[in-house]
Image (spheres, helix red, strand yellow):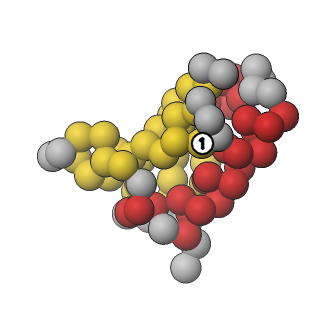
Amino acid sequence: MSYRVELHATALAQIKGLPPEAFDALVTTLADAATTPWDTMAMRPNEPEYRQAIFGAFGLVSYVDEPAEVLRVFDITWTG
């Protein structure tokens, strides 16, 4: 089973500045998260649906794992 990935407008705006290697790493990370979202880091102990995953050497993507099998990406950080 695979979850659908949706990007919030904020996350879409953050993608614009990514270098090509970071974008490729982000796509790979989100594809992996779509198949096993529970394998990423929980952001909050009492709200395990809020998750983060590291991508590339300097990236962090944050999303909500929703019961409707949707990953809603709300933040993308790249410090490289």
Q: Residue furthest left?
A: 46
Q: Is residue 17 left or right of residue 61?
A: right
Q: Considering depth in this image, is 33 or 80 the residue closer to the camera? A: 80
SS of the residue under disc 1 = strand
Q: Mark 1, residues whose alpha carbon is within 10 Å: few (<14), some, or many (≥20)?
A: many
Q: Considering depth in this image, is 45 or 20 the residue closer to the camera? A: 20
Q: In the image, what residue occupies the spot 59% across and 30% down?
A: 58
- Residue 53: percent from the left, percent from the top? 48, 45
Q: Amino acid at mark 1?
A: Phe
Q: Considering depth in this image, is 49 or 55 the residue closer to the camera? A: 55
Q: Considering depth in this image, is 7 or 77 the residue closer to the camera? A: 77
Relative to 1, is 45 above or below? above
- Residue 12: percent from the left, percent from the top? 68, 31
Q: Is residue 36 left or right of residue 41?
A: right
- Residue 44: percent from the left, percent from the top? 23, 40
Q: Residue furthest front?
A: 57
* Displayed quadrant of residue 20: top right
Residue 63 visible within the image: no
| Quarter of the image with the N terminus in it | bottom right
Q: In the image, what residue occupies the spot 77% across and 45% down?
A: 24
| Quarter of the image with the C terminus in it | top right
The residue to which callout 1 is attached is 55
